[in-house]
Amino acid sequence: MKRTLGIIGKKIGMTRIFQEDGSVVPVTVVEAGPCWVTQKKTTEREGYEALQIGFLPKNEKRVKKPLAGHFKKAGTAPVTYLNEFRVESTEGYELGQEINVGLLFKPGDVVDVTGLSKGKGFTGVMKRHGFHGSPGSHGTHEYFRHGGSVGSATFPHHVFKGMKMPGQHGNSRVTIQNIKVVEVREDQNLILLRGSIPGSHLGWVLIRIATKKKGAAEASA
């Protein structure tokens, strides 16, 4: 698997693009960058090659001293989001270098998008796992949306690990693979991705070249 640099962005919302053949393509608009290189990791020093990049300038008064020193060493202004991308080589990149969306992506590329899914709070098994629930008649009493028995009889005397039960729903890191890049507007730092992507309005996302491209173009067309 080839490791390539990605970019950090902010989900703006959804719209649609009208194409020359009259078809309509639903797209998600992402403000991707500009980002800045805040740290270089090399095989000689850290044991692997990686670039740490930052996104969205932050008020200096809201930055703690250790991070302030980190940004000062890199020669960049403080930023809100930091993320590390494994790369084949850090050669050609310098501390403080600006990374924009046009440098990494072009229309027609297939990408993977990672984001924080919408949090839905504490939910039951029907909403969280798609359980059907109990019948609405035939003697069912105050047990319509319950999960049913979770026990395991006399052996092995405990509830199995991973049992589907009520709990926190959403608010977790999610990656959607093989999303097609419809348009890149470098002058506005915008990238338009076909379809929906994880996360809520103004939520952060990570965009990188897809790692499993087989059949991706046909799936996204």
Image (cartoon, rainbow, N blue to C red):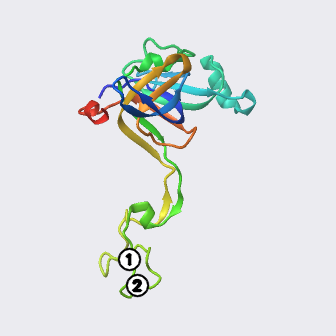
Q: Nearer the viewer, residue 23 or 194?
A: 23
Q: Are there few (<14), some (14-19), or many (20+) residues within 10 Å of tag 1?
A: some
Element class at badge 1: loop
Q: Nearer the viewer, residue 179 or 138?
A: 138
Check the image and report above or below for 126 versus 95: below
Quadrant in which the C terminus appears: top left
Dot label at residue 115? none
Q: Amino acid at mark 2?
A: Thr
Residue reaching furthest to the front: 22
Q: Which residue is mark 1?
A: 134
Q: Amino acid at mark 1?
A: Ser
Asked if disc 1 and disc 2 are in contact, CB closer than 8 Å, the reply is yes
Image quarter of residue 68 = top right
Dot label at residue 140? 2
Q: Are there few (<14), some (14-19), or many (20+) residues within 10 Å of tag 2?
A: few
Residue 216 rendering spot, x and y as whole percentages:
28, 33
Q: Nearer the viewer, residue 150 or 17?
A: 17
Residue 132 rendering spot, x and y as whole percentages:
36, 69
Question: Residue at coordinates 39% horizontally, 65% vertically from top-left?
Answer: 164
Q: Is residue 48 visible to us here?
A: no
Residue reaching furthest to the bottom: 139
Q: Nearer the viewer, residue 66 or 10?
A: 10
